[in-house]
Image: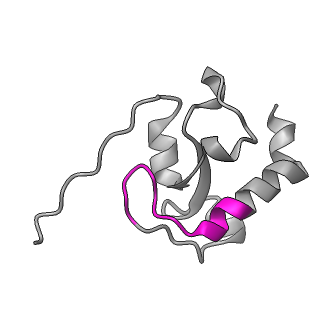
Amino acid sequence: MAGIRNGRPYRRLTVQQRALRLPCWLCGHNIAYEIRGVLAGKHPDAFTLDHETPLSLGGSLLDPANARSAHRRCNSARGNRTTVKQPRASRRW
C-alpha cells in the first residue's frame, strides 16, 4: 500500500487538501503551508495529509471525506489512534 501514496490519485488528493489551507484539525492552529519540498519532510509545522479514520483501522486512503489537514508533529503524535485530543482553550480573552 505504501507505493499507492506516490500515485497520482493520492498526490491529487494532497494538492486538493493543501489548497483548502485549513488549520490543523488536531490542534486548531494554522499550518505553515509555505514550507514545501525537502524541508517539509522534517519541519514540525509543515502540512501533512492525515486520515480521520487511520488506514490501519480500515480508513480509505483516497476518500476526500477521510482526508484532513494536519501539522507533521500533530499527525505523528496521534499515530493510528481514533481519538483526537481537543485543543486547550487560550487564556487570552
**Residue drawn at (53%, 30%) of the image:** 80
Q: Could you say which is closer to the camera, residue 78 or residue 9?
A: 9
Residue that protrudes farthest toward the bottom in the picture: 34
* Residue 25: % across, % down: 45, 52
Q: Give the residue drawn at x 46%, y 63%.
A: 23
Quadrant (top left/top right/bottom left/bottom right) for the N terminus: top right
Which image quarter is the C terminus in?
Answer: bottom left
Tell me which residue sits at (17%, 62%) in the image.
Answer: 90
> Vertically, is 86 above or below 33?
above
How far across and how far down the image is residue 39, in percent?
A: 64, 68
Task: Look at the image and say whether residue 11 sits in the magenta stretch.
Answer: no
Kindly report the secondary structure that dominates the magenta region of the rendered protein: loop
Q: Which residue is more in the foreground, 49 or 66?
A: 66
Q: Is residue 77 positioned above or below 32 on the image?
A: above
**Is 18 included in the stretch rendered in magenta?**
yes
42 to the left or right of 15: left
The chosen color scheme is one colour
* Image position of 58 with respect to 8: above or below: above
Q: Which residues are magenta?
A: 16-29
Name the spot of residue 53 as percent of width and height, x first. 57, 32
Quarter of the view holding residue 30: bottom left
Left or right: 78 as drawn, with respect to 61: left
Q: Position of residue 74 (x, y in %)?
A: 45, 49
39 on left or right of 79: right
Residue at image coords 58%, 72%: 33
